[in-house]
């Protein structure tokens, strides 16, 4: 299960690069052509960070889960469905971030995809815990730490989707903030800084 | 053999996303443009579920098979040929599901591809069993359970191809039903529900 | 080294599907449109079989090789360069098999790519043997069997490139024949048939 | 961490082939059409060699690093971001190497991407060393050898970016030279030649 999942995560995260549009060979001002495409680069970074977060959660979970039953395998496949789908709404958002009228739809579809990835990850973990598929030597405290990390992001995606209906561009910023908030290990950096001082 | 096969499955299942067509940047009604493309999304889900099923069977098999001889390696390569080919007929079906005249051909090619994946999986398993490549500690009962799962799907794909000649859209529905029928672990869910009550 | 190489082989073999051209949505006679594209499908099968052969040789070798020194790692990278390049000449050949004038160039470039894959595989093996990187428990006889398999294919690719200058289509047939000749395990099938009788 | 990273490296290096442009089916002089596209092939080789170098450094490091903490995992993700991004500036450079005016921008963006890959690799290693994540049985001498390999390439990319502002084509040549200089194991080849004599 792990090799296959790691493969899907790795491919989905790398396929995102195909969404970046290379300026035409005849273009005179390449620099400004690239800068004009900033929404595409923003969408690229948000999606890369979001898949990165999903992979980090997934690999923490597979480290703690001892064995997979048939339901867990299927939940995992559902998670991979939404992960491998993400390059699609990423492209839609990038295409429409200059188009006031349509970006609302694109950003909402994008947010729902992120929410579904997050929901599947949570479901996977809660199922594994409730079915005692987690390794015996993992302390209850550690289990609770992971649970406390997974569930709030579900809520924040829900709120961001709501905001996206009113202010799509703001929602993209929030999606980036959520991913960075999970990605940047504030506590570890704090400890590291204290030790260096 | 396993790492390479897992890689091919993971890539084939993730490449499917490239078939989804992103609406043009000038499009006003993105929402309805996306909804109008439902056959592409249906084809995406059917193919994702079918490759998911093939991967599940394959990983169960490689877990039970102890060693691979030269014939098994080649049968496996043939299976991977048809798995990695699936994004092609998926795209053909998606392109023609609005076109009464041509969809028959597309759906038939698609069904034959699914049948060939299923046939290679069955052949791989029957060969491994008959050549005693299966681990010694696997009980005969377990072997029979797997055989009983593999062979009927072969038959159902055959029937669905026949139906597809008369009613292509129905056949696509049947392909989805077959995949979901194998994917959804009814018994495990039943047991889980009974335990929860 | 193995995981990375297996990854490149798996991706190169799966990317070939992107070369297959899906008929336009407006096309009336999909069946005949697909049949007219037979050279693309032929090129697909030849390339799939050739990468399959290269992977089989490579995985046999990595099984026998105990450790990798810095030169072996670089030779391996060179092999992967030519493996991951193959989808390109495949596409060129497919594009020009209807075009008498140009197919000679395409088929020659394709043949040179196959020759280079074969040459790198041979070089990798000869280097590993001469530098005693092969596992100590592998008998000299086994080493010679592999060498005897690798070197003739190098020669046959050389001859086929020469033939391709005169009769390009014939050369493509020969490339398929070479790959199938290595892929089909005649001896193992013979033994299997004798045992079944 | 290793399987996922190896996957991203393998996919990024193989996706480069999609940047190679296949001549149109109607083209009469395929040979010269292919030759005219030499900048694309040069960019392909430079990028392949650069990702190859990054992978070699990365796999040496992961061999020496015993365990990954949360900061190391994130630094690794940042490295993978820049690795998986490389096919994009590769394409930009290839598109503009015939266009005097615009190639400066393309080559600079390309160089910055290479510099960032190199910088992340260095940061990863320095962090692992300073946090004692390196295996205990690795001698200090070995650690210094790796450090001495990583840091100079950072400097040479910096200089090459500067040169690229004045002479873009020369900078592409320097990027190739840097990659080949790291890839070609001069000392190992020297030893090998001495032994053969």
Image (cartoon, coloured by chain):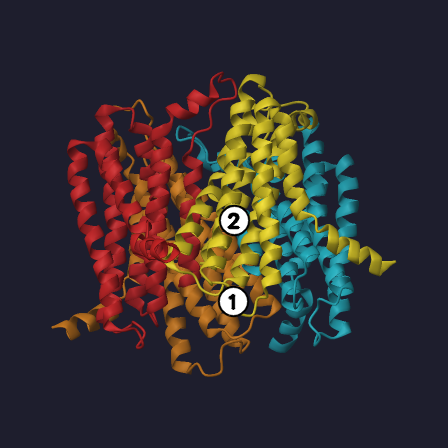
Chain colours: A orange, B cyan, C yellow, D red
At x 76%, y 60%, the residue is B126
- Residue C3: x percent and y percent? 47, 58
Q: Kindly identify which chain the residue marked by label 2 belongs to.
A: C
Q: Taking the image as drawn, is residue A106 in sight?
A: no
Tell me if C14 is positioned left or right of D150 in this view.
right
Q: Which residue is mark 2?
A: C122
Front-lying residue, A61 or C37: C37
At x 38%, y 43%, the residue is A17
Q: Kindly identify which chain the residue marked by label 1 belongs to.
A: C
The mark that comes first in sequence, 1 or 2, is 2
Place residue B38 in its image quadrant: top right
- Residue D44: x percent and y percent? 37, 38
Q: Are marks 1 and 2 on the same chain?
A: yes
Q: Which residue is mark 1?
A: C135
What's the distance in space between the residues labelled 1 and 2, CA to CA?
18 Å
Secondary structure type for disc 1:
loop
Residue B11's disc is none
Front-lying residue, A98 or A48: A48
Quick one: which residue is furthest to the right in this view? Answer: C197
Query: Label 2: few (<14), some or many (≥20) within 10 Å?
Result: many
- Vertical comparison of A32 with A192: above or below: above
């Amino acid at each position: 299960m792990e090799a296959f999942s790691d493969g899907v995560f790795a491919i989905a995260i790398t396929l995102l690069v195909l969404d970046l549009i290379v300026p035409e060979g005849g273009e005179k001002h390449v620099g400004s052509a690239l800068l004009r495409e900033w929404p595409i680069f923003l969408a690229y970074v948000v999606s890369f960070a979001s898949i990165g977060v999903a992979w980090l959660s997934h690999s923490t979970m597979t480290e703690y889960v001892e064995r997979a039953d048939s339901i867990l395998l299927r939940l995992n496949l559902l998670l991979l469905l939404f992960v491998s789908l993400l390059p699609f709404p990423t492209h839609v958002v990038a295409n429409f971030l200059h188009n006031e009228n349509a970006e609302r739809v694109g950003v909402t579809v994008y947010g729902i995809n992120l929410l579904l990835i997050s929901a599947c990850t949570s479901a996977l973990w809660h199922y594994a815990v409730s079915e005692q598929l987690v390794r015996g030597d993992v302390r209850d405290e550690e289990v609770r730490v992971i649970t406390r990390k997974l569930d709030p992001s579900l809520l924040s995606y829900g709120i961001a989707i709501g905001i996206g209906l009113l202010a799509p561009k703001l929602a993209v910023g929030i999606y980036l903030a959520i991913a960075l908030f999970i990605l940047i290990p504030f506590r570890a950096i704090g400890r590291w800084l204290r030790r260096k001082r």
